[in-house]
Amino acid sequence: NAGVTQTPKFRILKIGQSMTLQCTQDMNHNYMYWYRQDPGMGLKLIYYSVGAGITDKGEVPNGYNVSRSTTEDFPLRLELAAPSQTSVYFCASSRRDPNSNQPQHFGDGTRLSIL
Amino acid sequence: AQKVTQAQTEISVVEKEDVTLDCVYETRDTTYYLFWYKQPPSGELVFLIRRNSFDEQNEISGRYSWNFQKSTSSFNFTITASQVVDSAVYFCALRNQTGANNLFFGTGTRLTVIP
């Protein structure tokens, strides 16, 4: 009963380093999302995908890239880490959602600090 | 534009008290969906409820109830006979039927239930 799995749970990066946050889901959901949550704030959408091979920008995409080669996986890449990217990152998935009413299922989050 | 406002940043109640968390939203869409998520201290996001804009029936699930009023653009959440396990941050979120497939989150209300 894994649901949405994110790795790693914690990471510290130096400014300018790159890394990939992994996200995988085993519910055969078409839709996947990446959000960031800054302290004391709600979540903001970075990127989303409605199916393998299809990705699109959300509210705050700058500094990030994504790919969706399979239904299960939706990795998020930071190419040049900056202090402003210190945040908690959440991956989520939902069923195919033409009416926008499906609940999103979230992973446990990745806490990322850029120093 | 869409916006979700949770004016209560933090609330503390004594166990067994009732508590209402407020949520006010703005959207230009006529069809939209409202959600409540719970984020316990462990950090993950747990889906609680979804409400469609065309269904103003209130809902009760155990100790939880939700009051949706389109006239005041509010979707308030009441916990009856609160318990320590209810301590968490609660997020209200909005999703439009049109546009990007993302949730617009409020900034959350941190609820502390004191034993």
Image (cartoon, coloured by chain):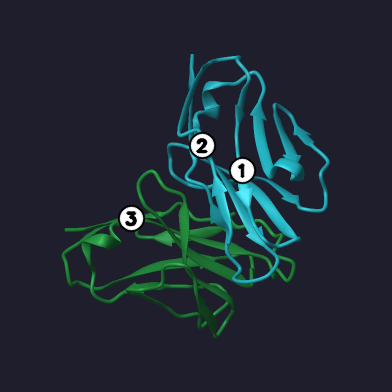
Chain colours: A green, B cyan
Q: Chain of mark 2?
A: B
Q: Amino acid at mark 1?
A: Val
Give the image location of residue B7, x and y in percent.
Answer: 51, 37
Q: Chain of mark 1?
A: B
Looking at the rendering, which quadrant does residue A97 occupy? Answer: bottom right
* Residue B42 rendering spot, x and y as whole percentages: 43, 40
Label 2 SS: loop
Above-or-below relation of B113 to A7: above
Instruction: Left or right? Give the position of B8 relative to A95.
Output: left
Q: Which residue is mark 3?
A: A87
Residue at the spot 50% in from the left edge and 67% down from the top edge: A24
The residue that disc 1 covers is B24
For the residues labelled 2 and 1, say whether their Cβ atoms are less than 8 Å apart: yes
Q: Are marks 2 and 3 in contact (CB under 8 Å)?
A: no
Q: Is residue A10 left or right of residue A94?
A: left
**Amino acid residing under circle 3:** Ser
On the image, numbered disc 2 is attached to which residue?
A: B7
Mark nearer the viewer, 2 or 3:
2
Q: CA distance from mark 2 to mark 3?
A: 23 Å
Q: Are marks 2 and 1 on the same chain?
A: yes
Same chain under badges 2 and 3? The reply is: no
